[in-house]
């Protein structure tokens, strides 16, 4: 055998040397024995790499299946013999390299089905046979949030929901993330109800009580409650300060005409008004001398700004109608970006943590901060989270559905509100863990209620 191997190597070397000298088939190999050896040699060279690759692939496949099997068996044993596909998948993904993730979904489902056909006794025996320590309780580190950037010597955080509905699962992310950071830095946590849109997002009277209840239920009792519509006189005061420093003007241009100015980057003629005229028209707005849509107060920015949405944006407009908290006391209402910017400054907000869909608001508010010479808070964002089972359902659609009898109320178990989830038996601890597992990232993700339900089972034992 040794001689055969040596001969094969020598022959291979000789063949190689002759092939270098001539492209023709070397005549030295025209013997029966040598042809046989050449055939064996060629077969080995062709086959060995394939064998190695197949063995490597099989080894990798076995490793992946072992990981899936371990988590499927453990999940089944801990949950009465029935493993949950999404819960197992969540565990498995944490142990795989990114390049392996795409192919794992179907395998998890297949293994889980196999495991669920076993009895609980068989599951336990198999699990402990292969992984003796799998059921030992581990002291797991609490999910840690990344440290806040910027100055953290006096952390003040806020959430600012519109009280047009009770909080839903998506809104609870803001409560959990901001609430946990407030605890982490021994900071201040503010719940501000932004209720200055009396028409499009008309406040729901009950929500003024429901939202604070929802926040407390989630485990955050130490917060300061601020209601924006109670601070209207403050917003008027800062509107007049902005006019006084030449940072705002009243505009009577029809909406379509101003849209054309904005599109072309042309300054509106109203920009050239004297300060006295702007102040008079502002006072006339407050006194009710204009109809809805006839006049607005604009923040003076740059009509050639590369982002058209930031060109002389509206700060105040007239909206007549009864407000559920203020009645008919006010008819001139601030736009959310103006109101929020003033509040964030006066309330001493150090960090704003919110969805990345509000980045545009950040740009507007920074322009206003520059006008007043203020420093804008450190701002962080999270990405969108899509919960498969709920899709995209707006508060207005739910409200309409309740009015039409489609839903029994805001706690109807089919809805994504916290009140509905609580009725379904979801614990606040599970919701907190769900959001802390996801963490603070700008990456958009999709999730399933089955993951939340799997977490929830831990707190229902």
Image (tube, rainbow, N blue to C red):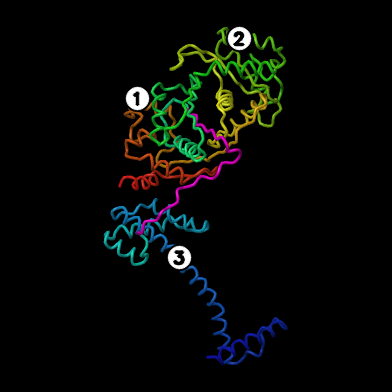
From the viewer's perspective, is 145 left or right of 311? left
Instruction: Please state which of the two labelled residues, at mark 2 or mark 1, is closer to the viewer.
Output: 2
Reply yes or no: does residue 449 show up in magenta: no
Instruction: Please state which of the two labelled residues, at mark 3 or mark 2, is closer to the viewer.
Output: 2
Among the 4 quarters of the image, the one containing residue 113: bottom left
CA neighbours of label 1 inside 10 A, class few (<14), some (14 to 19), many (20+): few
Residues 101 and 124: in front is 124
Q: Start and end of the magenta stretch?
A: 135-161
Which secondary structure, mark 1?
A: loop
Which secondary structure, mark 2?
A: helix
Residue 404, numbered circle: 1
CA neighbours of label 2 inside 10 A, class few (<14), some (14 to 19), many (20+): few
Magenta stretch: dominant secondary structure: loop
Q: Position of residue 280 (x, y in %)?
A: 64, 8
Residue 61, numbered circle: 3
Residue 104, numbered circle: none
Residue 283, numbered circle: 2
Among the 4 quarters of the image, the one containing residue 165: top left
Task: Name which residue lies at 58% across and 34% down.
Answer: 359
Q: Is residue 227 above or below residue 68?
A: above
């Amino acid at each position: 055998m040794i001689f055969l191997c040596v001969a094969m190597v020598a022959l291979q070397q000789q063949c190689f040397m002759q092939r270098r000298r001539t492209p023709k088939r070397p005549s030295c190999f025209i013997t029966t024995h040598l042809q046989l050896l050449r055939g064996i040699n060629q077969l080995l060279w062709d086959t060995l790499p394939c064998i190695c690759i197949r063995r490597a692939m099989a080894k990798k496949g076995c490793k992946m299946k072992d990981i899936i099997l371990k988590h499927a068996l453990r999940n089944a044993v801990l949950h009465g013999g029935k493993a949950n596909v999404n819960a197992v998948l969540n565990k498995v993904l944490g142990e795989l390299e990114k390049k392996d993730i795409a192919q794992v979904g179907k395998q998890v489902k297949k293994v889980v089905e196999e495991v669920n056909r076993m009895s609980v006794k068989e599951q336990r025996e198999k699990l402990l046979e292969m992984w003796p320590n799998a059921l030992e309780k581990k002291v797991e580190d609490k999910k840690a949030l990344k440290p806040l950037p910027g100055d953290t010597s006096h952390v003040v955080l806020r959430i600012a929901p519109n009280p047009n509905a009770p909080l839903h699962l998506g809104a609870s992310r803001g409560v959990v993330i901001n609430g946990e950071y407030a605890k982490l830095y021994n900071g201040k946590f503010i719940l501000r109800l932004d209720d200055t849109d009396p028409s499009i997002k008309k406040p729901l009277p009950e929500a003024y009580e429901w939202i604070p209840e929802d926040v407390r239920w989630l485990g955050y009792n130490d917060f300061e409650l601020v209601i924006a519509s109670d601070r209207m006189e403050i917003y008027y005061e800062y509107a007049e300060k902005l006019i006084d420093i030449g940072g705002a003007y009243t505009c009577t241009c029809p909406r379509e005409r101003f849209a054309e100015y904005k599109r072309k980057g042309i300054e509106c003629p109203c920009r050239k008004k004297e300060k006295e005229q702007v102040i008079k028209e502002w006072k006339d707005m407050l006194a009710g001398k204009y109809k809805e849509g006839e006049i607005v107060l604009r923040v003076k920015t740059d009509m050639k700004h590369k982002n058209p949405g930031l060109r002389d944006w509206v700060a105040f407009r007239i909206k007549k109608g009864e407000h559920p908290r203020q009645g008919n006391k006010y008819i001139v209402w601030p736009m959310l970006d103006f109101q929020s910017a003033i509040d964030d400054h006066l309330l001493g907000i150090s960090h704003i943590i919110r969805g990345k869909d509000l980045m545009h608001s950040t740009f507007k508010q920074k322009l206003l901060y520059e006008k007043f010479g203020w420093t804008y808070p450190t701002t962080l964002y999270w990405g969108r989270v899509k919960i498969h089972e709920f899709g995209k359902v707006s508060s207005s659609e739910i409200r309409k559905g309740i009015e039409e009898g489609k839903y029994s109320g805001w706690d109807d178990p089919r809805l994504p509100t916290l009140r509905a989830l609580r009725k379904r038996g979801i614990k606040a601890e599970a919701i907190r863990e769900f959001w802390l597992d996801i963490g603070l990232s700008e990456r958009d993700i999709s999730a399933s209620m089955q993951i939340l339900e799997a977490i929830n089972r831990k707190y229902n034992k």
